[in-house]
Image (cartoon, rainbow, N blue to C red):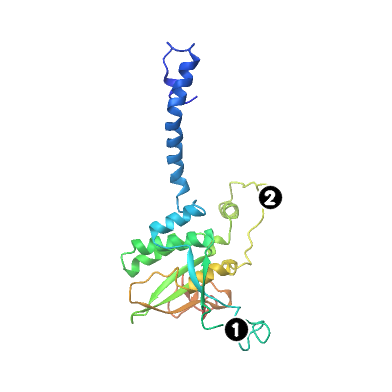
């Protein structure tokens, strides 16, 4: 029975056919209402999957299928497994590029960045908040450096906030504040502080970064370089600067190109 049958007056309690008629007449309305309510979650950028993400991509303006150079197939000198009797000769009509369908995880991140691009007002001081919102939980941070010559440099840094789990964060707060006591949940696994979040980023996401799918820039501006801190560092080295991106001796690191 439905909410509509609950509103039937007491005059009809002994008339099961009347109840069944009302239920049969109103059930489609209830099903349509439930389906419409479910679409809110089905097409939410954080919960959508598969074709739902594809439909979101059409609205946002970024397709899942992207063009990528074909590698590891055609014959090449001094390349392992692509030499004589290994690599395939590339004919005059063989393509240089192929197509790749991004996974849901990476495609979702690409769409979030595209949403940020669509809503960006073009001012550099608004970029940090936009990028932080788009990359939350991905394990990386991104900074856009304006070189003042119609080019930008892209910095990719590890996100230290994903190293420690929520339960370990609560345990740490409890130790610092001397309470309250935190009971360990079943199957508790301590955080791996020795792991750098940037080392856990999969190859597909690196490909998306290197091919500009996570780059926020104005039209006509070129990307000069994409860099990350060397030696697994969390920040770049710089004199007289100490912030979340740049630090001095013993903590800052030289940048290396991706």
As helix, strand or loop, the secondary structure at mark 2 comes to: loop
Residue depicted at 44% across the width and 75% down the height: 154
Q: Position of residue 207 (x, y in %)?
A: 52, 71
Residue at 45% over, 17% down:
18
Tell me how far mark 1 sits from mark 2, CA to CA.
53 Å
Q: How many C-alpha atoms fall within 10 Å of the one at disc 2: few (<14), some, or many (≥20)?
A: few
Vertical position of residue 84 compared to residue 52: above or below: below
The residue at the point 63 percent across, 85 percent down is 79
Pointer 1 with pointer 2, Cβ within 8 A? no
Identify the image quadrant of residue 198: bottom right
Label 1 SS: loop
Q: Is residue 99 visible?
A: yes
Quarter of the image for residue 34 reads top left
Residue annotated with mark 2 = 187
Badge 1 local density, few (<14 within 10 Å), some, or many (20+)? some
| Residue that lies at the very extreme toward the bottom in this rendered image | 77
**Is residue 3 something one can see in this rendering?**
no
Image depth: mark 1 or mark 2 in front: 1
Residue 41, above or below 129:
above
On residue 89, the disc is 1
Q: Position of residue 238 (x, y in %)?
A: 46, 79
């Amino acid at each position: 029975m439905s909410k509509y049958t609950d509103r039937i007056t007491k005059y009809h309690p002994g008339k099961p056919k009347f109840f069944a008629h009302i239920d049969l007449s109103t059930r489609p309305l209830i099903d349509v209402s439930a389906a419409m309510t479910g679409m809110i979650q089905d097409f939410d950028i954080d919960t959508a999957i598969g074709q739902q993400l594809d439909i979101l991509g059409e609205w946002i303006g970024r397709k899942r299928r992207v063009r990528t150079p074909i590698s590891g197939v055609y014959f090449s000198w001094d390349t392992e497994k692509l030499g004589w009797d290994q690599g395939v000769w590339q004919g005059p009509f063989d393509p240089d590029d192929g197509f790749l369908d991004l996974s849901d995880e990476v495609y979702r991140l690409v769409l979030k960045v595209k949403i940020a691009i669509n809503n960006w007002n073009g001012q550099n001081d608004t970029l940090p908040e936009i990028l932080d919102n788009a990359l939350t939980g991905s394990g990386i941070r991104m900074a856009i450096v304006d070189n003042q010559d119609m080019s930008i440099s892209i910095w990719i840094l590890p996100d230290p906030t994903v190293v420690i789990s929520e339960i370990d964060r609560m345990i740490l707060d409890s130790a610092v504040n001397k309470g309250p006591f935190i009971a360990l949940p079943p199957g508790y696994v301590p955080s791996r502080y020795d792991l750098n979040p940037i080392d856990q980023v999969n190859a597909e996401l690196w490909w998306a970064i290197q091919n500009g799918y996570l780059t926020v820039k104005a039209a006509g501006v070129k990307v000069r370089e994409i860099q990350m801190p060397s030696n697994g560092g969390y920040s770049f080295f710089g004199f007289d600067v100490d912030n979340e991106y740049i630090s001095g001796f013993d903590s800052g690191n030289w940048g290396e190109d991706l």
